[in-house]
């Protein structure tokens, strides 16, 4: 038996974009960066960003705590198991990509915007707003992970503004409702994957992401694979100092398919543990996603609320959604 394989990446397959000018809103370089991002989004749907504004030391702190958490006894991790707000720990077998025969070979811990239980939106029924589900045995996680969430969400907001500029829209077009974004963050642990499991077993099975943008820090192990336009799988190797960014289904929908939401997967062939850190950037729950249609065109999709769309996709992919009492 063997692993699913991918060809080695060429420099032209997944571009690397320096996004430093986006941190200076008055910079003349914003339009040039926006044009680069648009080219990447309209073709492969994946790109690397460097000078993204998140210090490596901050990333390292999150990953160190993540390692401690994932290598702790299962009974401790299960005390912070995933809840109805999609916050907390998911064990191997709880996530399976639609259409795949097997569940993903991964554990993950998910968190989002930290708001109190008595927040007005939580009380009004927003199912993705509320406190996070932190493990009591590792109290340092909360402040460290929340700080990373804030930094990555801000980076994603700048990217969405640049995308709007690239489409000749108002810069805030995609972030007008960003007071309580339903962005989610996830640290993911991939145990070593034995080759005798076969070519149809994955750390994460082939899929497209649900939301607008995904920002991923890979460790040095690698394993992320992206499907190219020719249908071949491309190994997206880790590049020091960068994040990997991909367009999700909701942004593809919002841009009326001008931007590509590209299938990707993870195969951990290293024989070692692999860790990744992802933030899925989305606006507020009630944001209406109406396709941006160029003159003379027609919408490919009906309008949909951001939160309704994300929740519907969760229901297809996570085993816990059928449980009662969580």
Image (cartoon, rainbow, N blue to C red):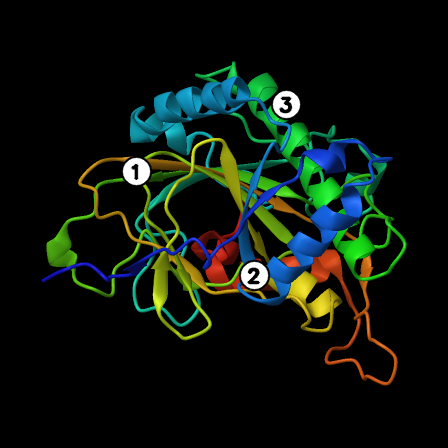
Residue at screen point 34% across, 45% down: 106
Which of pointers 3 and 2 lies earlier in the amino acid sequence?
2
Tag of residue 251: none
User: Do the numbered discs 1 and 2 sit on residues whose CB atoms are within 8 Å?
Assistant: no
Instruction: Using the image as rendered, state which of residue 101 and residue 225 is in the foreground.
Output: 225
User: Within 10 angstroms of label 1, few (less than 14), some, or many (20 or more) residues?
Assistant: some
Q: CA distance from mark 1 to mark 2?
A: 23 Å
Q: What residue does disc 2 label? A: 45
232 or 192: nearer the viewer: 232
Q: Residue 174 in the image: state x and y as whole percent.
A: 80, 53
**Residue at 66% across, 44% down:** 183
Task: For residue 2, say whether it is visible.
Answer: yes
Depth check, mark 3 against mark 1: the one in front is 1
Residue neighbourhood size for the residue with mark 3, other residues' Cα within 10 Å, grouped as few (<14), some (14–19), many (≥20): some
- In the figure, residue 312 lies in which quadrant? bottom right
Instruction: Quickly name the residue at label 1.
Output: 221
Secondary structure of the residue carrying numbered label 3: helix
């Amino acid at each position: 038996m063997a692993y699913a394989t991918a060809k080695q990446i060429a420099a032209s397959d997944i571009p690397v974009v320096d996004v430093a000018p986006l941190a200076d809103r008055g910079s003349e370089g914003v339009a040039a960066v926006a044009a680069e991002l648009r080219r990447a989004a309209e073709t492969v749907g994946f790109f690397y960003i460097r000078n993204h504004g998140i210090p490596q030391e901050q990333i390292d702190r999150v990953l160190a705590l993540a390692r401690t958490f994932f290598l702790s006894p299962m009974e401790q991790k299960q005390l912070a198991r995933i809840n109805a707000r999609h916050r907390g720990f998911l064990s191997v077998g709880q996530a399976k990509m639609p259409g795949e025969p097997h569940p993903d070979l991964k554990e993950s811990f998910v968190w989002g915007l930290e708001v109190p239980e008595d927040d007005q939106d939580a009380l009004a029924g927003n199912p993705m707003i509320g406190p996070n589900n932190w493990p009591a045995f590792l109290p340092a996680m909360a402040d460290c992970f929340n700080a990373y969430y804030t930094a990555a969400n801000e980076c994603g907001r700048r990217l969405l503004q640049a995308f709007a500029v690239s489409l000749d829209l108002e810069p805030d077009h995609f972030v007008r409702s960003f007071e309580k974004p339903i962005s989610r963050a996830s640290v993911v642990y991939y145990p070593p994957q034995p080759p005798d499991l076969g070519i149809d077993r994955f750390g994460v099975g082939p899929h497209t992401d649900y939301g607008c943008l995904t920002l991923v820090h890979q460790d040095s192990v690698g394993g992320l694979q992206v499907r190219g336009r020719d249908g071949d799988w491309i190994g997206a190797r880790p590049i020091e100092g960068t994040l990997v960014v991909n367009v999700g289904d909701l942004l593809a929908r919002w841009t009326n398919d001008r931007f590509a939401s590209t299938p990707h997967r993870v195969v951990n062939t290293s024989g070692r543990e692999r860790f990744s850190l992802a933030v899925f950037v989305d606006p507020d729950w009630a944001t209406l996603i109406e396709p941006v249609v160029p003159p003379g065109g027609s919408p490919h999709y009906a309008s949909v609320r951001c939160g309704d769309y994300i929740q519907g996709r969760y229901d297809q992919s996570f085993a816990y959604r059928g449980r009662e009492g969580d």
